[in-house]
Image (spheres, coloured by chain):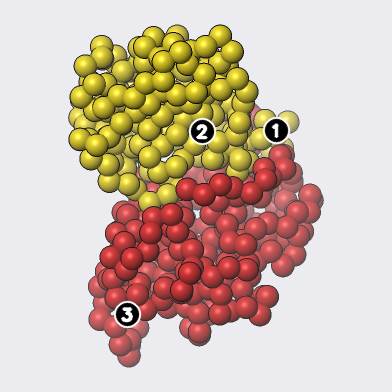
Chain colours: A red, B yellow
Amino acid sequence: MPSSPPRPRATSWQPAEVIGITDETKRAKTFRLRLSDRQAHLAGQHYVVRLTAPDGYTASRSYSVASAPDDPAEIELTVERLPDGEVSTFLHDELRVGDELEVRGPIGGWFVWDGASPATLIGGGSGVVPLMAMLRLARLQARPELVHLLVSVRAPEDLLFADELGGDGATVVYTRAAPPATVRPVGRLTSADLAAVLLPGATVYICGSSGFADRVTDLLGQNGVPADRIRVERFGPTG
Amino acid sequence: MAKLTRGFAGRGRAERDPRLPPGQYDAGRDWPVLTAEATPRLATDTWTFAVTGLVQRPTTWTWDEIHALPTSTYRGDIHCVTTWSKLGITFTGVSIDSLLAVAEPRPTASYVMATSHTGYTTNLPLEDVTGGQAWVVWEVDGQALPVEHGGPARLLVPHLYFWKSAKWVSALRLLDHDEPGFWEQNGYHDRGDPWLEQRYQGD
């Protein structure tokens, strides 16, 4: 694991106003927040969201920023609704435009893209969120050739950001059900799927469940990608 | 102080377990996996663990040699900075005290840098890994430690956030000063006491 850049500044809690809520899929929404403490994030970083009840009880969770660092005062967090998720169910079912949340960030200096070197991005399901910030940054900088995003989803209705993943620089793999006229047969990611999207000299960013991350890491090994070129962000429980 | 969130009541804290530090939830039977690197496959016949730096006798143990030391068991709780905790989990391995008794820290040693076979690092005050507070462990709940949880062996420092419990641990290097490790360079706290919510730099 290579060394990291200089330590980022310390962060503290700040109020953030909800200025937009967008449905991405049946289970995922994007929350656009206006920050009071302006600081541009790096593509791949996350914020912590804290909810506080009247008796002082708090619940906090980390969510990746989906937006490119195009506006230091606003961020978009894309959140999947987990049926038992104390925070995600509140955000999905209760939160309204105009409400205020407390947030802290941006956090993370490892799973970030510098916007300048080649990057291959591999996302499983909602693991696409931090990778979307990277793809959007590349497009914003008019350097789309620097990144390629591959996202693996079960079915079309699970695909986040579908409007932005149709063109160059993005590949969608369907594992259970695909839209009509999809050439690739449905099925799990293969070594050939990865070979088709690997950019020469790229750092590979993987985000998804732990099982997904391990499978992709193994497939990358079959493609000759050394472990020190792989950065992983995992989520989800294991047994 | 935290500001009230409109409409948020929270769940079930009437029976909140007193073993949970502030801001943590009980993960129950789940054990989430959070690592920043590819999972390494380490063979126990070539595995080693070393204590180096400011010690009288820098020492390296093989898998068989470390198993020949007196085993020690921790039963208690672990707390991840991402807010899950696991309560009542059992780990077995060897106490760091037993390893330091062989290597003998020099009087100036005051911090340690734990290093993993992957290159992961994390820094700790020496006093947080001595006095029966830290282990190198290879069993969890009576089973071999799975690779995704750091097997064949990991560091265990359960009174601090779990990123301090380096997976796939390979060495402890004793220092006379503090140096930030991997997550600590990336914005996380240098000590990481869950009861003080020392999650990030500045807490």
Residue B70 at least partly seen: yes
| Residue that numbered label 1 is attached to | B202
Q: Are marks 3 and 1 in contact (CB under 8 Å)?
A: no
Position of the C terminus of chain A by quadrant: top left
| Quarter of the image where one finds residue A96 | bottom right
The chain carrying label 3 is A
Residue at point 43% right, 66% down? A122
Residue at point 24% right, 37% down? B46
Residue A198 in percent (x, y) is at 42, 73
Vertical order, B179 against A161 (above or below): above
| Quarter of the image where one finds residue B6 | top right
Which of the numbered marks, if any, corresponds to residue B179?
none
Work out whether residue A138 or residue A209 is closer to the camera in this orientation and state it.
A138
Work out whether residue A24 or residue A75 is closer to the camera in this orientation and state it.
A75
Between disc 3 and disc 1, the foreground one is: 1
Q: Amino acid at mark 3?
A: Ala
The chain carrying label 1 is B
What separation in Å lies between label 2 and label 3 (alpha carbons)?
44 Å
Label 1: which secondary element: loop
| Residue that numbered label 3 is attached to | A178
Residue at point 60% right, 54% down? A45
What separation in Å lies between label 3 and label 1 (alpha carbons)?
47 Å
Residue at point 25% right, 73% down? A187
Vertical order, A206 against A11 (above or below): below
Q: Are marks 2 and 1 in contact (CB under 8 Å)?
A: no
Residue B85 at least partly seen: no
Between disc 2 and disc 1, the foreground one is: 2
Label 3: which secondary element: loop
At label 2, counting other C-alpha atoms closer than 10 Å, the crowd grade (few under 14, some 14-19, many 20 or more) is many
Which of the numbered marks, if any, corresponds to residue B122?
2
